[in-house]
Amino acid sequence: MQALFILLVWGTLLAIGCIAPFVLGLAYIWVDLFQPQYVLPELGRLLPISLITAVLAIAGYLIADRENPPRLGLLTALLLIWATWITLTSSWALFPDPAWTKWNWAFKTVAFSTLLPFVFRTRIQIEAAVLVMVCAIFAHVLPYGIKGLISGGGYFRALGLIDVNAGWGGEGSTLGTYAFATLPLIAHLRRWSIIAPDKGIVRFIYMAAPPFAILGAFSTFARAALVACVVWAALTWWDSRRKLAVAVLLLAGAVAVVPIMGESWLDRMVTALNPEQESSAMTRLVVWGWTVRFANEHPLGGGFNSYLANNVTVTLPDGDVLEVQQRAFHSIFLEVLGEHGWVGAAIFGGILLTFFLNLRAVRSRTRDSEDLQWLGSLAQALTRSMLIYLSGAAFVGVAFQALHYYLFALAVCSTAFLAAVNVSTDRRPATARTDTPHSWRMRARRGSSGL
Amino acid sequence: MIDNFVILITCGAVVLVAFRAALLERRARRSAAAFGGRRQHQNMRR
């Protein structure tokens, strides 16, 4: 029954995509984030859902949706360089077989992020992409939130739709980071959404989403989620107008979380403060130290999964001996450094820097335009979302997971939209330069009033 | 039970979003076409 419903959803998206090709891009995002092939493994064995959707999305664009291609910039160029560089590092990888296995899906993630700006060009299309991302992520976060509320959650407990570590939705730290990273996007949608405006039942969904995201993230007992939560709370407080009221609210929320999650959750969170006294945290520190030394020896990178080379023995302050062997990087930054060397780290750093600078430019250019306030808000939400994501990802190896590549793609979409507006307004008479080319409501209003 | 409920509402929401987005996009294109036609007509009158 579950399989039939998921197939029905997939089929409906593809059917709508036949009329509106950008929906095939939405279908790809849904498949990539919801991961039906992991939710129902038998479905994955029956059909290559991801491959079919990707092929249809590309074909849909090429056949029926090639008008007005966006103007791409430095961010897209850097993403293409990144895709090339990870291919090159795979060619000299220390462990070729596992490296090419990871390259196979990592390359697709990076490559598809450069294609999405061609598909999502208008306000409605960009907003639909954000909404589908949020819905697909919440499909994995909500079960943790609801079951965590009932049972209190737990570390390494399979409370979600998929098995532990089967995909991002089964990995506690990644799920917690994703949950907090979506909160700024939800806040943006609540204010500016045309597709799901903040009224009626949707208002209750917008109100309920943040508490369930927080509960879902904390139910994983992942410390990365706590780090992401602190950054989210700090950004929320920093941007708020009523700083005292928000500070009191956040503190009250923090106090309320402890009795809901229980003593065991608090005990685990406290270990983040003393990493030397907890073997999991200490292992990460040892691996990170090894990674920097490894990158100095291999500045061009050791290829995907080069962590397989680590074999370190350290003596802890209490005299115990800790042996670290073939342990994963457990950090987005160290993963990039270890696998793709200092060159790869520079390219990835350049992508992040360009992302933040582009969105900053979008915010400053839309500040004075009433019709583009939504775009400024989206740019701000994407910036916050990335900051929260990176703070949690600093403790998880998610360099090639999908979410931040979608954020990159949406940043390119925003910049391209703004460029299209500027070109459009430059070509039009001064009296008509107040609306955007895609502001259909304004056009309809003007049309009916005879202007 | 909880999993089924979550799949139902989140996947249902995705379909609704896609359907509404396709509808709004179509309306926007029609509106833009009408607006473009009106402007062309006004330019011709000038």
Image (cartoon, coloured by chain):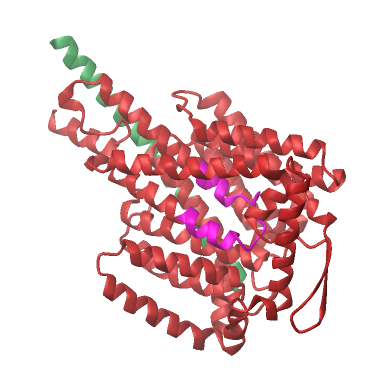
Chain colours: A red, B green
Q: Is residue A21 above or below residue A93?
A: above
Q: Nearer the viewer, residue A421 or B14?
A: A421
Q: Residue at x 40, y 67 (%)?
A: A234
Side of A345 relative to A184 (left or right):
right
Q: Is residue A23 above or below residue B9?
A: above
Q: Nearer the viewer, residue A121 or A75?
A: A75
Q: Nearer the viewer, residue A55 or A386?
A: A386
Q: Position of residue A82 (x, y in %)?
A: 64, 37
Q: Residue at x 78, y 47 (%)?
A: A297
Q: Is residue A295 above or below residue A252?
A: above
How many badges with numbers are in the image? 0
Q: Residue at x 53, y 68 (%)?
A: A227
Q: Position of residue A381 (x, y in %)?
A: 40, 53
Side of A376 relative to A262 (left or right):
left
Q: Residue at x 29, y 36 (%)?
A: A439
Position of the N terminus of chain A, as image quadrant, is bottom right
Position of the C terminus of chain A, as image quadrant, is top left
Please state the extent of the stretch shown in magenta in the rendering: A385-408
Is residue A394 within the magenta segment?
yes
Residue A302 position by quadrant: top right
Q: Position of residue A111 (x, y in %)?
A: 63, 36
Residue A189 position by quadrant: bottom left
Residue A60 position by quadrant: top right
Side of A353 relative to A236 (left or right):
right
Q: Position of residue A215 (x, y in %)?
A: 51, 75
Side of A264 relative to A358 (left or right):
right
Q: Nearer the viewer, residue A4 or A150?
A: A150
Residue B21 visible from this viewpoint: no
* Principal secondary structure, stretch drawn in magenta: helix
